[in-house]
Amino acid sequence: MNLKVNAPLDPGYMPMAVVYRDFQNAVKTAGGQKLTIGLERNNGLTSVLTIDVYKDGTGHDEENHEFVERLVKTLLWARGGYKVIIAGSKVIADKIKADYSIGGSREFDCNEMSNIYEAPFEVINVPFDQAPAQNESSAPVGRHLDGCRIGFDAGGSDRKVSAVVEGEATYSEEVVWFPKLQNDPQYHYDGIMDAMKTAASKMPRVDAIGVSTAGCVVDNRIKTSSLFLKVKKENPEAFEKVVKNIYIDIAKEFGDIPIEVANDGDVTALAGAMDLGDTNVLGIAMGTSEAGGYVDGSGNITGWLNELAFAPCDYNKNAMVDEWSGDYGCGVKYFSQDSVIKLAPAAGIELDESASPAEKLKVVQGLMAQGDERAAKIYETIGVYFGYAVAYYALFYDIKHVLLMGRVSSGEGGNILLKYAQKALSEEFPELADKITIHLPDESSRRVGQSIAAASLPKIK
């Protein structure tokens, strides 16, 4: 694969955006057929993508399968759904069904979708002329700045909280914690409660609580989240009893006040939309994992999952595998502290294996602050990754602005990351570079902006 901008520390990188473009061009040259992928989720909402594939039985069946499987995976985690409809090819549908089944290569994904939507996961095939119609929905959320509010941002390495009075953050703090390593939900409950009480002590009263959290949230309840991974795996009863309603229960301790819990990526996008005074904002937070969120052309939240950490961005089958999902080339290993750690050996940087991921990131950031060229190469590589990923995400989101946040984007490394992301996008996809602007907020917003935006989520009764 010939790229116009190469990832300096990852010569095998195969960006999905280029794979998609090359595949579509090759199929059109060969004379292909149309295929529609539909995903149905709660309340009959349906997302649809129509593409060109090679005709069945022309020697390209496995190429079709591998290409479509990556798109199905992306759609599942960008949009969400418990029913996949493949319209136009039974050959492809049968292969996808085998992948996304118990015992299949994507068993993790079908199990997670089934848990999130509380419905059996299925893949069905229909003729192309019976492809489902798109049925989307969005709703306004956030931008409420009246009263005394707590904004809490739950990350995998630190938790951030802000006391926000009439739209002004009067107090903010960050506290290091290790939720991913804990199987006792009391650790999480105590940490969250301590943060809330600290913020509450800085205000005359608490009128509302807004929460930004990693994971999938439905009706303020945690359906799945990397923060509570050990609880879910090792103490599933406690997950059901304590974790699912943890934020609702904590809010009750402050009285009969409104609470709104949202995916941290959506809060990132909301923060950007509020700051920019515009719409069509894709927010990406690079922290313990990759969080994605989106504010549409109406300024609304869509209800899509936007869990781009699980969405593939690298087509190279030899790419690093995500330990949780068991899949290769997914965003978590490219747009989080995992990416920095992954690239350190290739840059010639040795990190203490006994250190936590957050501590390893700080070592690289310290080297970057000293002008270390090895550290700079890491951020150049992540920047190239990101520029190509933005082009891929543009296939699924109508984007005017991309807001980049999270601790990986802090410091001088963030500026290098931005520079190379813009370079990759403009040189490989100039038509997109003309319409999409990538923004890197100021340092304070990058660090605690999400907790402040989170505070604006609930509407005071």
Image (tube, rainbow, N blue to C red):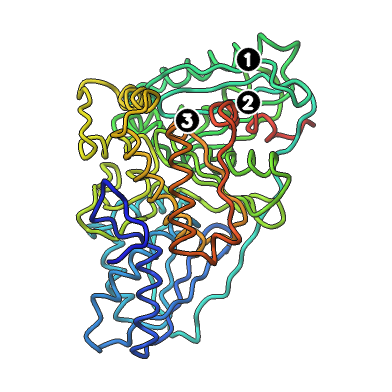
Q: Give the residue number, with chain letter if any, for mark 3.
A: 410
Locate residue 176 relative to residue 323 in the image: left or right: right
Q: Position of residue 90 (x, y in %)?
A: 33, 81
Query: Which corner quadrant of the image does residue 392 belong to?
Result: bottom left
Give the number of the disc on residue 151.
2
Distance from Cα at disc 1 to Cα at disc 3: 24 Å
Residue 166 or residue 364, whichever sits in front: 364
| Quadrant of the rendered image containing residue 335 | top left
Mark 3 or 2: in front is: 3
Other residues around mark 3 within 10 Å, as few (<14) / some (14–19) / many (≥20): many
Task: Say what secondary structure mark 2 lies in.
Answer: strand
Instruction: Check disc 1 and give the amino acid type.
Output: Ala
Q: Which residue is mark 1?
A: 199
Label 2 with label 1: CB-CB less than 8 Å = yes
**Quarter occupied by the C terminus:** top right
Q: Specify the amino acid type for callout 2.
A: Gly
**How many dots with numbers?**
3
Instruction: Return the x and y of residue 347 as percentages of the image width and height.
Output: 24, 37
- Which residue is found at the position 24% from the left and 54% from the top? 11
Q: Residue at (62%, 21%) from the top-left corner?
A: 162
* Three-letter code, disc 3: Ser
Q: Nearer the viewer, residue 392 or 90?
A: 392
Circle 2 crowding by C-alpha within 10 Å: few under 14, some 14–19, many from 20: many
Could you tell which of marks 1 and 3 lies nearer the N-terminus? 1
In the rendered view, would you say 112 is above or below 56?
A: above
